[in-house]
Image (cartoon, rainbow, N blue to C red):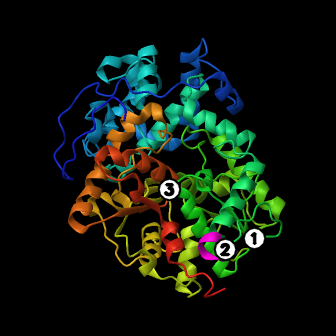
Amino acid sequence: MADFETPALREYPDEIPPLRPGATAHVRPFPAAPAHQEPLGFPGELVEDWQARALEKMGDLLGKYRSLQVFLDACVRCGACTDKCHYFLGTQDPRNMPVARQDLMRSVYRRHFTLGGKIAPALVGARELDREMLDQWYTYFHQCSQCRRCSVFCPYGIDTAEISMAAREIMDHVGQGQKYCNEIIAKVHKIGNNLGLPGPALEDTLEGLEEEVKEDTGVDVRFPLDVEGAEVLLVTPSADFFAEPHVEGLIGYAKVFHQAGISWTLSTYASEAANFGMFIGSYENMRRIALRIRKAAQDLGVKRIVFGECGHAWRVAYSFLNTLAGPWDFLDKRYPVPQHMCEVTYDLIRRGALNLDPSANDHMTVTFHDSCNVARASRMGDMPGGQFHIPREVIKASVNKFVEMDPATTMERTFCCGGGGGLLTDDLMEIRVKGALPRMQALKEVVEREGVTHMAAICAICKSQFTKVLPYYDLPMDMIVSVHQLVSNAIQLGTKE
């Protein structure tokens, strides 16, 4: 356990907590070294003329993304967002109110890009981008998980995530990058996955999983790698290869493909669904990572691309994949590009192609955590709200006891786990634990009232984050499970193939 105080659980919704100015001013991520910056095309360290280059980059982004200028102009300080951010609720630091975090960039925008700010800066809240301001940017734009909950409640639809991404891109552009994200992106560019897992190690891992499933079930379930001519290319977060509970989800995918008779493969070259380029706001790095998936799909000659359980990867795939790496006209036109693994399983369940026995999970009472990037930045299937409906239907087909958490904390109102947006690093553990407070409050309530024993999620970051922070709130770390872990337990192999 780290050296900070875990916030006390309260009932949600509650009153706006007392303010503690500067409470998390000391919490900031480790800076990126030149070895992390340069492979991404950024300066290795803060450049001498950083102010001029930062303002030039801001002007470039304002010209490229009109939404950014609208977001910086539109705020009327109505206060609707003030108590909607999990980091503010957990830390009580007023700078973590979305409006206050946005103002760090808005004040610089007013000083240099508005007439009022140039003529009378003090009257319009305009400020210079000096070293003190840059330090505040680095601190507080890395205390935003880009979850977009504040935008749901903003009457003008101001998206703080877009502002945070722009701020991080500007900082990278002048050599002020964050180690965790940039080191990971460099590994993907070089090796193909966040972990730097080379092909032989991946092959050995998958062989081990085949042996494990054979031992558990007596059935030969394959975990294919680099199979040319397979129907499906599965792109999944590399945490699925070995981390708990992620790997149980991968085993579930394999069992679904096996029972449905769908040929599939993983790729050594594109062995990562996550795209941290989004977290740092870098379109070029997002594009380089997405192009690996396109190349793998073409090299292997697959017909469909399916994404495993990863929240922000699904946001990038659903919202940006076509513009980043399309067109995908070489794939089978009968299937959308991309598909989520939950869509595949849901469709098979509806068609009676899977034999599921929910009593296999009768030792569990399950609730579901909507992952923020899936809930507020994407869709699933061909129906409005499919991103909420489909995972729940998959869970309900796999368990007998399912309980919803407080509706003020689910679906489009869901709270971030506290580790998203490039914050899943131990140097930010304090903000991660405190940011998890609202979700922990809602979870504890159904644990005590309904006897919930497990919480399912479809995001690799959520699973890793909850595994780490649940013990801080006196909850067992193994109560977080993959949705396809539930499917894996319930599927009756040997009855349909």
The numbered dot on residue 335 is 2
CA–CA distance between discs 3 and 1? 25 Å
Q: Which callout, 2 or 1, points at the residue further toward the start of the chain?
A: 1
Residues 467 and 23: in front is: 467
What residue sits right under mark 1 in the picture? 303
With 463 as the anchor, is 123 left or right in this view?
Answer: left
- Measured from the top left, where is residue 221 in percent x and y? 68, 72
Mark 1 Cα within 10 Å, few/some/many (few <14, many 20+)?
Answer: some
Residues 170 and 440: in front is: 440
Q: Are marks 2 and 1 in contact (CB under 8 Å)?
A: yes
Residue visible at 68% across and 36% down?
186
Task: Classify 86 as above or below 213.
Answer: above
Q: Would you say residue 217 sits in the magenta stretch?
A: yes
Mark 2 Cα within 10 Å, few/some/many (few <14, many 20+)?
Answer: few
Q: Considering the image in quadrants, where does the N terminus appear?
A: top left
Q: Would you say residue 374 sits in the magenta stretch?
A: no
With 177 as the anchor, is 21 left or right in this view?
Answer: left
> Mark 2 or 1, which is nearer the eye?
1
With 492 as the anchor, is 93 left or right in this view?
Answer: left
Residue visible at 46% across and 38% down?
163
| Magenta region, residue range | 215-220
Amino acid type, callout 2? Tyr
